[in-house]
Image: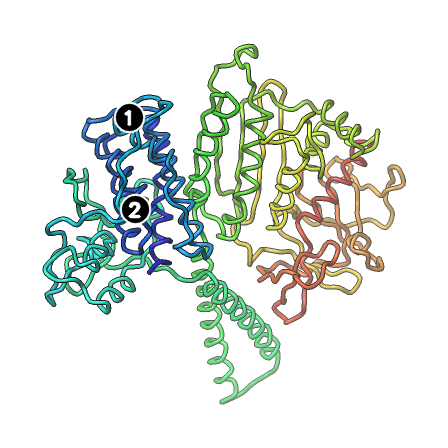
């Protein structure tokens, strides 16, 4: 029950923070006031039920604050927003501790300064005072109203809301014996909890209201502006909508995906074997059986592919789940730096593999902090810009990739300054990073920083190299574009799906290899002899001179007769030489974990059952960057 409460309450706490930042810009929005009130009320009820007194106290005071705000008894001041943000932060911290396995008894009590600021906000003050009188202690559990539960069919107290999902507040009142005609039995309570677990709605507009509306606490409060949408039906409530979502352990979904992938591979291998069998002549009963076998295998292949696609879709999550964490971070950091910054978010509905969503938080935090500290000017008026700066964070789908972009309208980056800094720190030589683009990418070098003195925000030479590593870990790429006086743009490209990627199957030095199709432009024939620039082979393709690399050579194999070239579709194109191209395939990739091999990111099985080594996307991009110098010399 504690686990169910923590999962649901974390959803509510995250959405509350987002609503509070919106309320700061639109203080008269009654719908948001009601949504925040309901969220704290619901969390309070669950916290009381699982015996978390500090969380109950914080939620109770914050609930009182928003009751006063929506009734006009207190104004929506900056102090009120700050108090509510501190309360939601305190609640979220305790929930995260519980999520990480902390004993509920070990949680800290509500800080006195949080109680003070909430009390001041309730009293309608606009700024904290030095010695505010302490608020009256809040009981660990609010007093129960005279009658809050609706009798169920068996005469016990109902702990289900009007929409059929669990009402934590009513559950607490029922079990504590302070509500209804009789307290619910332990068995009924356990059944109610087991029946109540459901995911929060993904859309921002329904993030809070999708949770059940709690019943009133001891202090009478007006009804919410609108009832939350129904989410499930029960035997006692036949008119409600059917359940639309359940929570499933992520490990089970991963296991299902692996089985689905293996079934697709098995079906593909069976199809290849069938094709070989059909080269023989069959007559009579054997011919009829072969026809039936072909039909059955075709159907099995279609079903296994559908199973794989359906399983993959369960791993997809909107990036908005990640983006909604950043408005407060930007607000607080901008405040600390004395800058006026607005974060504009778009494309939050774009979906990507959940593993990517979970791993992108730290990289995006690093980039946002860099934009705030390094990019946004302190004196924008001197630069002829409006005082309020803008950082845009957006996502969109592009073919089989997801694009995530952070752009700030700050001072931009000076490539010459970056080169001098990198040379001064001994990170590059005098003749490296000559081009504008190469100089910008220097910020990804470990140990690189333009700060003379490290601060709490940046300057220690860590961060951007961590960003690059995290992105490339998921077969992604990251680039920087910047113009002095205009701003800087970070662009991240990631595959939508991590476990299955479209590839080109090639063979070189006797090895079967797969190249991600995301960087393949086309296939060309290679001549016996090449022109050379600086001792390196170059081929003129469509009027442009491109360096030629041997795939066998860069992987450390014994080079053979490579007469087929693959033009790489990257910012600085080059040609990769192979012995043969054997087609394309969507492969189920299994990452290499026990060993590390230069250039190889994982393995897969071809339709014929042969082991295929998958060449890493970041490795191919390194080849792209090393070829840029040869291009510049031509």
For the residue labelled by badge 2, is the local secondary structure a helix, a strand or a loop? helix
Residue located beneath label 1 in the image: 76
Q: Position of residue 429 (x, y in %)?
A: 83, 32
Q: Is residue 145 left or right of residue 352?
A: left
Decide: is 111 above or below 371.
below
Q: Is residue 588 left or right of residue 145?
A: right
- Quarter holding residue 379: top right
Residue 603: which numbered mark, if any? none
Mark 1 or mark 2, which has the lower sequence index?
A: 2
Q: How many residues crowd mark 1 within 10 Å: few (<14), some (14–19), many (20+)?
A: many
- Quarter holding residue 543: top right
Q: Is residue 413 left or right of residue 144?
A: right
Decide: is 410 above or below 45.
above
Residue located beneath label 2 in the image: 56
Q: Position of residue 24 (x, y in %)?
A: 34, 27
1 and 206: which is toward the camera: 1
Q: How many residues crowd mark 2 within 10 Å: few (<14), some (14–19), many (20+)?
A: many
């Amino acid at each position: 029950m504690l686990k169910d409460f923590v999962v649901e309450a974390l959803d509510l706490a995250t959405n509350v923070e987002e609503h509070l930042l919106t309320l700061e810009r639109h203080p008269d929005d009654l719908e948001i006031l009601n949504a925040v009130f309901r969220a704290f009320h619901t969390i309070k009820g669950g916290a009381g039920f699982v015996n978390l007194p500090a969380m109950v106290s914080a939620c109770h005071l914050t609930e009182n604050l928003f009751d006063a705000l929506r009734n006009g008894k207190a104004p929506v001041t900056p102090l009120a927003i700050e108090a509510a943000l501190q309360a939601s932060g305190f609640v979220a911290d305790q929930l995260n501790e519980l999520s990480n396995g902390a004993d509920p008894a070990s949680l800290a009590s509500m800080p006195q300064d949080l109680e003070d600021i909430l009390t001041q906000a309730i009293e309608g003050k606009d700024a904290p005072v030095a010695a505010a009188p302490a608020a009256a202690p809040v009981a660990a559990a609010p007093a129960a109203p005279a009658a809050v539960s609706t009798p169920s069919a068996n005469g016990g107290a109902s702990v289900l809301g009007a929409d059929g999902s669990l009402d934590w507040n009513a559950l607490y009142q029922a079990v504590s014996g302070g509500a209804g005609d009789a307290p619910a039995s332990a068995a009924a309570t356990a059944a109610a909890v087991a029946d109540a677990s459901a995911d929060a709605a993904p859309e921002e507009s329904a993030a809070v209201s999708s949770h059940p509306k709690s019943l009133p606490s001891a202090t009478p409060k007006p009804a919410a502006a609108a009832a939350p949408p129904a989410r499930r039906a029960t035997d006692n409530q036949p008119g409600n909508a059917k359940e639309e979502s359940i929570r499933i352990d992520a490990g089970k979904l991963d296991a299902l995906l692996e089985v689905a992938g293996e079934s697709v591979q098995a079906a593909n291998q069976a199809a290849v074997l069938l094709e070989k069998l059909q080269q023989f002549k069959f007559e009579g009963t054997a011919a009829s059986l072969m026809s039936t076998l072909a039909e059955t295998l075709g159907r099995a292949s279609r079903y296994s592919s559908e199973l794989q696609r359906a399983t993959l879709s369960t791993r997809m999550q909107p990036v908005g789940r990640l983006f909604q964490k950043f408005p407060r971070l930007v607000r607080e950091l901008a405040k600390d730096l004395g800058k006026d910054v607005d974060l504009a978010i778009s494309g939050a509905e774009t979906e990507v593999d959940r593993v990517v969503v979970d791993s992108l938080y730290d990289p995006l935090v690093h980039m946002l902090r860099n934009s705030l500290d390094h990019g946004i000017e302190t004196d924008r008026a001197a630069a002829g810009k409006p005082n309020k700066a803008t950082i845009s964070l957006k996502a969109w789908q592009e073919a089989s990739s997801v694009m995530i972009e952070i752009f700030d309208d700050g001072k931009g980056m000076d490539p010459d300054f970056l080169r001098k800094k990198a040379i001064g720190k001994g990170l590059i030589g005098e003749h490296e990073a000559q081009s504008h683009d190469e100089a910008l990418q220097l910020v990804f070098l470990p140990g690189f920083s333009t700060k003379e003195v490290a601060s709490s925000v940046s300057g220690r030479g860590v961060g951007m190299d961590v960003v690059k590593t995290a992105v490339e870990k998921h077969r992604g790429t990251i680039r920087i574009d910047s113009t002095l006086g205009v701003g800087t743009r970070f662009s991240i490209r990631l595959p939508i799906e991590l476990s299955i990627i479209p590839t080109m199957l090639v063979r070189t030095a006797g090895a079967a290899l797969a190249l991600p199709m995301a960087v393949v432009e086309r296939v060309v024939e290679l001549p016996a002899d090449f022109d050379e620039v600086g001792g390196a082979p170059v081929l003129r393709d469509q009027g442009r001179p491109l360096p030629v690399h041997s795939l066998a050579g860069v992987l450390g194999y014994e080079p053979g007769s490579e007469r087929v070239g693959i033009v790489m579709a990257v910012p600085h194109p080059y040609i990769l030489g192979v012995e043969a191209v054997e087609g394309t395939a969507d492969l189920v990739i299994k990452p290499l974990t026990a060993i590390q091999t230069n250039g190889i990111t994982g393995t897969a099985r071809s339709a014929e059952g042969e082991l295929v080594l998958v060449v890493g996307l970041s490795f191919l991009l390194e080849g792209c960057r090393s070829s840029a110098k040869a291009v510049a010399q031509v």
